[in-house]
Amino acid sequence: MTCCPSSRRSATTSAPAVFAVSRTDSSPVVPLDGGRFVMGTNDKILPQDGEFPARPVTIKPISMDRAAVTVSRFARFVAETGHVTEAERFGWSYVFFALMDAPETYPALPGLEWWRRVEGASWRSPEGPESSVEARADHPVTHVSWNDAVAFASWAGGRLPTEAEWEYAAAGGLSGARFPWGEREPDDTDFQPCNIWQGRFPDHNTSADGFLGTAPAESFAPNGFGLYNMVGNTWEWTADRFRIRSVSKAAQQANAAAKTSGMRVIKGGSYLCHNSYCYRYRIAARTSSTPDSTTGHMGFRLCYDGA
């Protein structure tokens, strides 16, 4: 069962206008030398996601945002361009029920009942019309689609990373590590190196890591490259279309459906992940969503060609 609901509004939804700007957005970035590394994993933890197999990949030098794009940074983009996000244009987005005052008043998503379709939810109002981002300027922006992220990237002078670039960056120089900090598993008691779920999903979160929803984009210790929250907090869009590297009939059917709907790879997991439900806060983990989908736990960061 997927961690990320797809809006599935339309496979032919047009992308927002792309803004050509003659300057680069001034956000802290980290230069990455690139080189050869091992992408994916041979541990078949979630084989339906296409994490397998491990394979060598060469990455060219790039720079990457030190943290996910924040609310304040996205607000500058909107102020300068007048961009209207897809959640705002469609009039609704998905919100996790425990973050709402009266979740029972909103329709639940069948099979994923903890997600509620909330009229008026957007990057400005993450839990619906009565909420705001006034106190969350340094948190990752959410309720932004892949199309919104691409428009932002054009304005900022960057682009979304490929899945391989994202994995290389997340590893932080570690070879074959499961997590950006190494092999130690996060737990519900005394080791919370990232913002994920603690307790019993979906009805009890102890918030042992200090957060029920998003955390500031530069929370927790950075990885070996100096990048913050490469796993946990919010999922991050990548440039790549979703595809499973397998010749099995099931994989080919999944690939055909993903191609038809334009599914894009998202990486890193979110504040809703737990190893009992969505064990996708690992470097090799992946899932997908349609390019017009928006939720309260998906964001993005950019990379830039040349270190």
Image: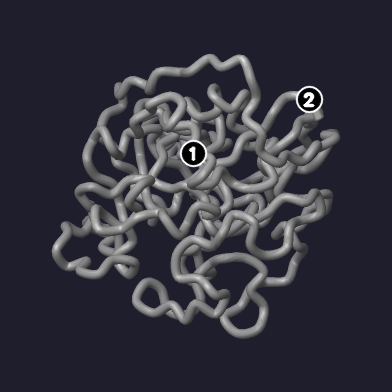
Mark number, residue 19: none
Residue 288 locus on image (x, y percent) = 46, 42
Q: Amino acid at mark 1?
A: Phe
Q: Is residue 285 above or below residue 18?
A: below
- Foreground mark, 2 or 1? 1
Q: Is residue 62 above or below residue 199?
A: above
Residue at 44%, 53% in the rendered image? 297
Q: Is residue 239 left or right of residue 67?
A: left
Residue on which the image places disc 1: 74
Q: Is residue 277 left or right of residue 155?
A: left
Residue 150 locus on image (x, y percent) = 49, 27
Residue at 75%, 66% in the rendered image? 183
Specify whether residue 50 is in view.
no
Residue 184 locus on image (x, y percent) = 73, 71
Q: In terms of secondary structure, where does tag 2 sit?
A: loop
Q: Is residue 306 left or right of residue 85?
A: right
Residue on which the image places disc 2: 306
